[in-house]
Amino acid sequence: MERRTGREERQGVANAEQGGPGGAVGTGGAAARWGTVCAVLWLVAAVLAVRQVAVVLRTPRSERLTDLETWVGPDGVLHVTGSLYDSTRFTGTPFGGLVLKPLTRAAEQALGWGWTFGTLLLVVALGLVAARALPQPVTRRTALLAAPVAVTLLMLSLPVRNTLYLGQTSIIPVLLVLAGCFAVRGERASGVFIGVAAAFQPALLLFVPLLWFTGRRRAAASTGITFAGATVLAWAAMPHDSYAYWVHHLAGVGLGGRADDLANQSLHGALLRLGLEGPAEIAVFFTLATAVAVFGMRRAIHYARDGQLLLAVAITGCVVVAVSPTSWKHQLLWVLLAAVGRVGKKASARYVWPVAVVLVMTLPAKMMVPNVGVLHPVRDNVVLLAALASALVVPFLSRTSEYYRHPIPTVYAPKAQTRFSWAPLLRRVATRPNLLLELLLIRVTYAAYQRTRLEAAGSRAVAEEHARQILGIEKALFLDIEHGVNHAVVQVGWPRTFFDFYYTSFHFVVPLAVLGVLYWRRPADYRWARTAIGFTTVLALVGFFFYPLAPPRLMPGLGIIDTIHGVQDFSKPDYGTLTQLANQYAAMPSLHFGWSLWCGLTIAIVAPRWWMKALGLLHPTFTVAAIVATGNHWVLDAVGGAAVVGAGFALTHLLTGPRAAPGTDEDDGTTDDGAPRTATSGPRDPVRG
């Protein structure tokens, strides 16, 4: 990258914002609409900021801003007369201690409101700088929306939330680096900003080779000189502390919490969690860290020379995350910046990478990765893996690629003809959806469903009262067969075994199998069916919230035997309440039956053979028998499940139009080798997809 590139990029952004070259100025009406959208996004960012402040300030004083308290509280390390590192509670550099010590009393007085609002201002400044640093060219619409979107994502991110809750200073180094790269005029001033950031976090010296090998050698030299000067100044003022940090603790290694804690998302922490210890772990760590630094910095330099300086900065930050001995949660914002990279030739694939990054940086790892033993190493290191992927693996597009600005467009089906002309029909994508994006969204949606279902639990008394209401209705309709069916199954061995197995095994397997087959063989039907089951599940959650219901097996005195879990102890006061695994009162409607009915109807509609249709309808038949025989649901729960399934299909029809006719499963706009479709390429076989 030549020395003038940074100035040219900043000027390009300014031109885009002013509607000059690179920016598209729409009509007055379009400009007004996008201005309204921008205002709404800023409102969302403001609401999130208020919410974060409220969460922090509603937390008891003894539990919030705990890291700040360890610095400036009555017994904080900045009050002690000895070394800052005697207790290992202070993890910053001696320069950080030197800067913070004069601010001790002011920080004590501002502990709470002042510190929290100051951090929010830093987050807003960070979002504004990142938005202005987007690689060119950008449209005026992108320039208009980038700032509120960036601030919103920062507010939602786990590092910012962790920083606000703990009272950390980790926003400052990131902001200093971005300001030095994009907001400061002159290479020497730029280097001063980055050097000060490195004085707070030494691993940021990795930005020196990025600057040097991209032609900004004055900035690189200024960074090194500033870092050295700040370190020498701290050594002169605090020699004992400087020796403790740089020599005794090897630049901070061993300070703070345990290095194998899940909050440490560095290679060092991951190796310790995998069981490596001692000299072997140190040797492996240094080998891997060196390799990551070399190859990661080569990629960063490549993208900086390509004109994507913000992506290069993000990649360098991801390398810092990986190679630092400790990279705590509040120090991981670099990974979020990697979302600016463009990946994929198709427009439909363009969202996979940024969505994955945003999900990783805003949701807990347990929501991203299932709680399966073999996946625990992935779940425990998910942010580190995202950082390594950004630094080493993800094939970000070059600006010289023909697909950088013009990806292969998404193909949409013709507008559906429907009797409900007033309905807000959504655009129906005619191509197979991106598999990785679908898997990410399905996993996150299911985790959100689990969490919502748990939060919907009502009291035991209310749930049992609702159960008595259901039983009364069933008696009036002569449907109260739960006791008879349950005891008939218990008395015979093999039906009980069969229904127990069917209840516990087929609830997830069959819906996932149906979705998988449709995705591969019938993409258009996949979208239609996936939307229907999504609406079904959302409607069921509404029922769980407003009508908590005790299942037959949780009703004392009814005599229903829980065939799966065995005889229960109703004398326990917490029996049947919210558990760590499932909401015991999420019975109405029955999603066991609802999902099975969705499977049966989908197979019956889509399958080409009569015996396939009949086989599909057997699944809801066996399921309704299983939920009653095992004592897990009332008969009317199945009726409720059928109702939400019908409503789910109805909403799908209303919002997206009727299901696509057989034989019109749309192709994805490319040939089998992924090249754009030409006039002579011919359509794909709809069955093969």
Image: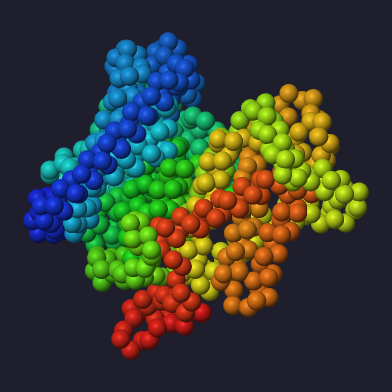
- Left or right of 158 in this view: 116: left
Q: Residue at x 37, y 67 (%)?
A: 416
Q: Quadrant of residue 426?
A: bottom left
In which quadrant will I find the N terminus? bottom left
Residue 356, compared with residue 183, is above or below; it is below
Whether residue 306 sits left or right of residue 64 in the image: it is: left
In front of the other: 144 or 396: 144
523 or 140: nearer the eye?
523
Up the image or down, 644 lies above or below 255; here it is below
Q: Can the viewer see residue 622?
A: yes
In the rendered image, the vertical position of residue 478 relative to residue 120, given as above or below: below
Residue 184 higher or lower than 440, as above or below: above
- Residue depicted at x 16% and y 53%: 30
Q: Is residue 442 visible?
A: no
Q: How is the image coloured?
A: rainbow
Counting from the top left corner in percent of width and height, residue 254 is at: 50, 33
Residue 654 position, x and y percent, is 42, 58
Residue 138 image point, x, y percent: 19, 57
Q: Quadrant of residue 502?
A: bottom right
Residue depicted at x 18% and y 45%: 35
Farthest bottom residue in view: 680
